[in-house]
Amino acid sequence: MGSVLEKMLVVVFDDEPEARDAFRALSQLDAAGDISVYAEAMIRKSQDGSLTIEQSSNVFPMGTVEGTAIGALVGLLGDMPVTGAAGGAMVGSLEDLDRAGVNMEFLEEVSSKLKPGKWAVVSDISEEVSTSVDQQMKALGGHVFRVTWQNVEDKQNAREMASLQTDLKKLEKEEKTEARAEKRAEIHSKAEGLRDKLHNRLEQAKLRSEERKKEFEAKLKYLEGKMANTRGNVKIAIESRVKDLRKKAEPTQKVEVQTA
């Protein structure tokens, strides 16, 4: 089998019946083992640009899609300008993008089709190949958008914390060599401010890592439950996805505050 990838999938439709058929079709593909659907929502875009979740299903313990990647993605799409282009402006927070597992380019591509009056099915899935999904969604009249799940926040945090560490080391060096007491106290105060900022960043990263761990555990529990009740090629596909998720369950942020 090919490499298993976690993806955020959005399929845009002109009307409600098509979207409802697609919602059911993805569940059927999940049952057949072609994909694994962890959370799914059918949304409608109103004339004023707001989004409404009309139907949803998910395997997470939070109980509602608002606590999942789907909820974050729907919120971001609802914040996009009606034109579908952000014009370089940040829509939503870095944390929202990270939770949704997408980037701005993906949001803009989806919004270019998700006009007022349109419907869409949004899903958090694992799949090896896209053929089955694409064929069924296009047969129903859908425009398919997918992106491999991304750690947006971790990469940005790593860069920012590395920069803060460099600045902190410079200040600590200056503090040691500064002879004037008043100036030394000023430098010390700046260094303390940087240490506090680094500490807060690390705490945020730790909390986000714990959230991801819960999400992974919920997905694993769901897949393991299905695996126990399947056989043949379906079971083999699910086993591959379980292995993939376990590999990704390791913490991704291991930055420590260092002082001279």
Image: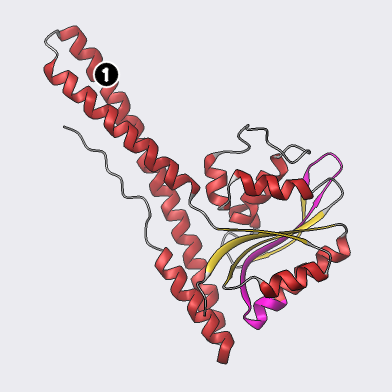
User: What is the crowding at mark 1: few (fewer than 14 residues within 10 Å), some, or many (at least 20)?
Assistant: few
Q: Is residue 166 left or right of residue 144?
A: left
In the displayed orientation, state which residue is furthest to the bottom.
232
Residue lying at 20% horizontally and 34% vertically, measured from the top left: 259
Residue 54: say if magenta.
no
Q: Visible in this render: residue 231?
A: no
Q: Quadrant of the C terminus?
A: top left
Q: Is residue 83 above or below residue 43?
A: above
Q: Is residue 135 above or below residue 117?
A: below
Residue 30: say if magenta.
yes
Task: Between residue 110 and residue 199, name the one nearer to us.
Answer: 110
How far from the left and from the top, in percent, is residue 170?
23, 25
How far from the left and from the top, in percent, is residue 133?
70, 71
Q: Is residue 110 above or below residue 4?
A: above
Find disc 1 in the rendering and name its residue.
189
Q: Secondary structure at mark 1?
A: helix
Q: Is residue 182 left or right of residue 242?
A: left
Q: Visible in this render: residue 129?
A: yes
Q: Is residue 247 left or right of residue 55?
A: left
- Stretch in magenta: 28-51
Quarter where residue 39 is shown: bottom right
Q: Is residue 39 left or right of residue 223?
A: right
Quarter where residue 192 is shown: top left
Quarter where residue 35 is shown: bottom right
Task: Between residue 139 and residue 61, name the one nearer to us.
Answer: 139
How far from the left and from the top, in percent, is residue 25?
75, 74
Residue lying at 41% horizontally and 64% vertically, measured from the top left: 249
Residue lying at 42% horizontally and 55% vertically, measured from the top left: 210
Task: Between residue 180 and residue 143, name the one nearer to us.
Answer: 143
Residue lying at 18% horizontally and 13% vertically, measured from the top left: 184
Q: Amino acid at mark 1?
A: Ser
